[in-house]
Amino acid sequence: MKKQIKNPEVKIYTTPTCHWCMLTKEFFKEHKVKYQEIDVSKDQKLVEEMVKKSGQYGTPVIDIDGKITVGFDEEALRKGLKIK
């Protein structure tokens, strides 16, 4: 019986003008990663949630199954998503 691979839960906290957010989303698209985008520019409570998780006000903040990566860090994203 094949072991089913669980897709990680991925959230990305973004703002509309964030260049690094755009690069991260392009990386996700290229590797067919499903993710939930959270635009923190629309709600102060979302900013507070992001800062509580990361300690950072800058975007993007990426949450992969509870592991936080700040900024577009391709190596960390590949590791967290198990992409070679």
Image (cartoon, rainbow, N blue to C red):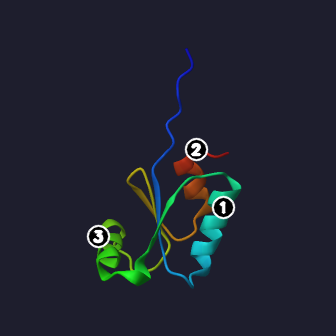
Q: Which quadrant of the rendered structure holds the C terminus? A: top right
Estimate the spatial distance between the alpha carbons at disc 1 and disc 2, rounded to whole Å. 13 Å
Q: Is label 1 or label 2 in front?
A: 1
Q: CA distance from mark 1 to mark 3?
A: 25 Å
State whether residue 9 is above or below residue 74.
above
Which residue occupies 60% across, 67% down? Answer: 24
**Contact, mark 2 vs mark 3 (Cβ under 8 Å):** no
Q: Residues within 10 Å of mark 2 (few under 14, many from 20)?
A: few
Left or right relative to 44: residue 38: right
Expressed as whole percent of the image width and height from the top left, the position of residue 62 reads 47, 63
User: Secondary structure beneath disc 3?
Assistant: helix
Question: Which of 69 and 2 lies nearest the eye of the viewer?
Answer: 2
| Res 27 label | 1
> What amino acid is at disc 3?
Lys
Residue furthest to the top in view is 1
Q: Which residue is mark 2?
A: 82
Q: Between marks 2 and 3, how big is the CA–CA gap?
A: 26 Å
Name the spot of residue 51 as percent of width and height, x first: 33, 74
Residue 47 falls in image quadrant? bottom left
Residue that appears at 60% across and 52% down: 33
Q: Amino acid at mark 1?
A: Phe
Which residue: 62% across, 80% down?
19
Number of other residues with Cα within 10 Å of mark 1, as a class: few under 14, some 14 to 19, many 20 or more:
some
Secondary structure at numbered mark 2: loop
Q: Earlier in the sequence, mark 1 or mark 2?
A: 1
- Badge 3: residue crowd in 10 Å (few <14, some 14–19, many ≥20): few
N-term mark: 2 or 3: 3
Residue sticking out furthest to the front: 42
Q: Is residue 25 left or right of residue 64?
A: right
Residue pointed to by mark 3: 52
Q: Amino acid at mark 2?
A: Lys
